[in-house]
Amino acid sequence: MKFRIVYKKWWMRIFLRPGWAMVFFFWMFVNKEKKDMTDRHYRHELEHCYQVKRMGRIKFYATYLWLWIKGGYDSHPYEVEADERANDPLTDEEKQWRVNDKVIL
């Protein structure tokens, strides 16, 4: 499973607040410049990539949407899990993915 990391495109202003990011199917969209993305922020989004891999794309996004509608963003279990993992140190492989703008799971 591969995700391409895409940074700060003009159209992201429409869908993402400044500084926000999201994992969507084959991409990690980041509404920041590459140099401004912190390890913590990257690790949070990377956890969503791992979630997608564990569950499969269709199940992940269907469940994500359902739980978001039902309970909102702040208490969303996938967001809580990603926040809990955000401070985990990056592995050498995860660092390399960041350099190459590709996550390969």
Image (cartoon, grey):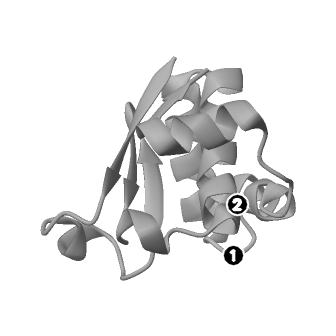
**Is residue 44 toward the left or the right of residue 33 in the image?**
right
User: In the depicted view, which residue is nearer to us: 11 or 79?
Assistant: 11
Give the x, y percent position of residue 17.
Answer: 36, 80
Give the x, y percent position of residue 12.
Answer: 23, 66
**Is residue 95 toward the left or the right of residue 31 in the image?**
right
Mark number for residue 104? Answer: none
Residue at 52% x, 17% y: name it.
1
Report the residue marked by disc 2: 79
> Which image quadrant for residue 101?
top left
Quick check: 34 above or below 88? below
Quick check: 35 above or below 6? below
Q: Secondary structure at mark 2?
A: helix
Give the x, y percent position of residue 67.
Answer: 64, 54
* Amino acid at the residue labelled 2: Glu
- Looking at the image, how many numbered discs can be counted on the residues? 2
**Is residue 69 toward the left or the right of residue 55 in the image?**
left
Q: Quadrant of the C terminus?
A: top right
Report the residue marked by disc 1: 74
Q: Earlier in the sequence, mark 2 or mark 1?
A: 1
* Amino acid at the residue labelled 1: Asp
Disc 1 crowd, CA 10 A, few/some/many (<14, 14-19, 20+):
few
Residue at 51% x, 68% y: name it.
37
Say whether marks 2 and 1 touch (CB < 8 Å): yes
Quick check: 73 above or below 17? above
User: Is residue 51 visible to us here?
Assistant: no
Give the x, y percent position of residue 71.
Answer: 67, 68
Q: Secondary structure at mark 1?
A: loop
